[in-house]
Image (tube, grey):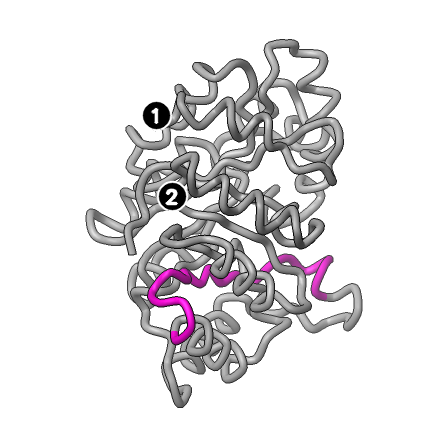
Amino acid sequence: MDISGVGIWSQQLRWGDQAEVADAAAELEELGYRALWIPDVGGPVFEAVEALLAATRSVTVATGILNLWMHSPADTAAGYATLTAAHGDRFLMGVGVSHAPLVDASEPGRYRRPLAAMTAFLDGLDKADQPVPPERRVLAALGPRMLQLAGSRARGVHPYLVTPEHTRQARESLGAGPLVLPEQTVILTTDADEAHAIGRDWLRGYLGLPNYANNIRRLGFTDDDVADASDRLFDALIAWGDEDAIRRRVDEHRAAGADHVCLQVLTADPKAFPREQWRRLAPALR
């Protein structure tokens, strides 16, 4: 499994029309993207992974991330074994603790001691009848303790909604061996007003989640930046502009120590597959 270059992180590949999912996945592989990442908020995530594996030949398919509160370690390990038996060694399991407001929405008080919950989940994967190898899993790590756990119990980290500075800190924390695989949100427009119209409300939704807000403050942003989704914070978290501008942000992550960067492309229609943007970006990122 070669996790390098640039990949695509896409909610459309997780929940979109299945015929277009298959067609888009095959095209993304042909365009040269090295990995396809999909989110998970519960439900049949392994079926979604299987559909992407079946539609492609060699690209890595990854969860970004599998929500550990919504899957048992035993079922997760069994799902991994089934997928790898059918499609070879192409599934990278990203695992994360998600966020208290999301997890507690259906069962108040369930989200507690996330580091201990992650440790227990990894223990379960290790003890399963068909274990998930540490080198085939990465953790959604933002803070120092989760980064440390990822360095000892997984192949690396998949941080979401981060800056190149966080990538630098993750690499410094992990050292030279583990993988650093950040997500980078992008908007392919040179019009600042259009970029803000597309991305501001999207960003505000994430800033209301404590794990992201706390990580952003650790990176030096203020409470006002977080409360207002300031232009300074917007520009730090969302790369917008033409193809060259997006490539520069990817290069910043690489210079900071990233092994692979997965791009989440936002457009005015959040349900539409951003296929035109994927096509435009591919040659600039090879």
In this orientation, which residue lies closer to the viewer: 21 or 93? 21
Residue 30, image quadrant: top left
Residue, x 67% and y 34% (percent of image)? 203
Residue, x 73% and y 71% (percent of image)? 109
Residue, x 58% and y 44% (percent of image)? 10
Report the disc number at residue 193: none
- Where is mark 1, residue-wise? 251
**Picture quarter with the C terminus:** top left
Residue 270, image quadrant: top right
In this orientation, which residue lies closer to the viewer: 285 or 27? 27
Instruction: Tell me if residue 227 is in the magenta stretch.
Output: no
Residue 252, image x, y percentages: 36, 25
Residue 266, image x, y percentages: 64, 31
Which residue appears farthest toward the bottom when viewing the image? 129
Local SS, label 2: loop
**Picture quarter with the N terminus:** bottom left
Residue type of the residue flagged with mark 1: Asp
In this orientation, which residue lies closer to the viewer: 69 or 229? 69
Which residue appears farthest toward the left when viewing the image? 176
Among the two numbered marks 1 and 2 on one chain, the one whose residue lies closer to the N terminus: 2
Residue 248, image x, y percentages: 39, 19
Residue type of the residue flagged with mark 2: Arg
CA gap, disc 1 to disc 2? 16 Å
Looking at the rendering, the stretch of residues picked out in magenta corresponds to 85-103
State whether residue 66 is above or below residue 165: below
Disc 1 versus disc 2: nearer the observer: 2
- Where is mark 2, residue-wise? 34
